[in-house]
Amino acid sequence: MEFIDLAPSAHARGTVQLPGSKSISNRTLLLAALAQGETQIRDLLKSDDTDRMLEALTSLGVTLTRTGENDYHLVGTGGSFPHKEADLFLGNAGTAFRPLTAALAFSGGTYKLHGVPRMHERPIGDLVDALRQVGADITYLGQEGFPPLLIKPAHIAAQGSIKIRGDVSSQFLTALLMALPMTGKETHIELVSELISKPYIEITLRLMAQFGVEVQRDGWERFTVPAASGYVSPGIVYVEGDASSASYFLAAGALGGGPVRVQGVGAKSIQGDVAFADALEAIGVTITKGDNWIEASAPQLPLKAFDRDFNHIPDAAMTLAVVALFCDGPSRLTNIASWRVKETDRIAAMATELRKLGAIVEEGEDWLQVTPVPTLNAQVPIDTYDDHRMAMCFSLATFGGVSVRINDPQCTAKTFPTYFDVFSQVVS
């Protein structure tokens, strides 16, 4: 197995230009493909997940051209993919798999969607059940409720109301919202359980509006997609920097004194994970913000222990699980059940690896408690479970004055292929 050995870190200072947001990148690609007109996309994230979406759209007959290092030109299909038959491999990209499932269910073609083994362990049954309510023909090719899927042409009767759960993954609601304008019918979506990760739905709604579709929202329980609401290209779209990736460098600024500034997200960001900065501020970190940047520094350690609900920012919350090693008492992360069905079971994985470092860790179905120890175990090999966020989070353990070995560092290619190079430029 490949690995990278990280030396102990004492200081962090510098400026980081963030890669593009994965959530915005893959949503923008699909919306541009479904829209009328041509779209210029600037600052698209270059990663495994966006590569899978680009490959899928090409297989579906979308004309797209790379015009710069991170820039693309897409010719929209007006809501009807040219190719009515395709076999799509989507890796472990939930932001590609879930929205494409919904869009292809309304496309009148025959499509097979599959991915890596872990993708076949990630639930999709709630989305499939919702799509079947309007007539979609979707068959499970393996275990019921999980990919791979076979989608066939069907008569879609989208008028009325669709009921869906919101407490497993917000990507199911995102997929429905993005696909329903393809039907041309007014449709209501009703949530039958609490909606998690609400900021990701805000991203979806704002990007849909950018492409000309205004969804009406009644609280977080009911959404209405208006009739005759096709997408129209806005011409040029700029992708924000990735707010989840910002969390590692803001945490480094906190643990290494700082200041560390991230550029690409700021006070005007549409991404919910910028709230990570507020969570840091609450435990003693000095945070300053501009429209397109955030900066973090801390006068001294330890930081304050915390007990916080992370329902809204589950991805960035992983970073705080490692930051908890540097707090002045036990810290508790709650309402993180969605960790269980991500790239790996993140609650179990995080608990296992934190214990290797010496921390006392308790875990429940939807919570994690981390009690720090005076001295971390040195030269610990951290397993990453083919999960990019595990690899990036545990680089922060080096601020405990110990070297850390990160196994399979290439897994960061999912969202941030150059992460460890950039990290080494900020820490010393």
Image (cartoon, grey):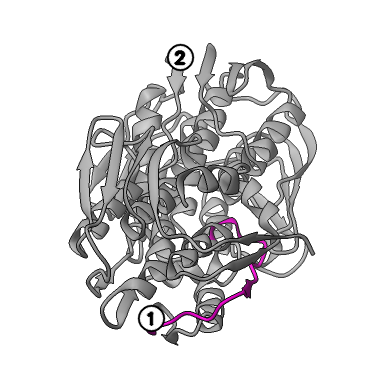
Q: Residues within 10 Å of mark 2 (few under 14, many from 20)?
A: few
The numbered mark, 2 or 1, whose residue comes first in the sequence reads 2
Give the labeled residue for mark 1: 370
**Where, quadrant-wise, is the N terminus in this rendering?**
bottom right
- Identify residue for label 2: 236
Up the image or down, 232 lies above or below 399; here it is: above
**Secondary structure of the magenta portion, mostly?**
loop
Q: Callout 1, which amino acid? A: Val
Q: Is residue 372 magenta?
A: no
Q: Which residues are magenta?
A: 373-389
Q: Nearer the viewer, residue 68 or 378?
A: 378
Judged from the image, the secondary structure of the residue bearing numbered disc 1 is strand
Near mark 1 (Cα within 10 A), the count class, few <14, some 14-19 or many ≥20, is many
Vertical comparison of 330 with 163: above or below? below
x, y (%) of residue 324?
Answer: 35, 72
Q: Classify residue 5 by image quadrant.
A: bottom right
Report the Cα–Cα distance between label 2 and label 1: 45 Å
In the image, is 353 to the left or to the right of 410? Answer: left
> Is the Cβ of the residue at disc 2 closer than 8 Å to that at disc 1?
no
Pick the residue in front: 395 or 300.
Answer: 300
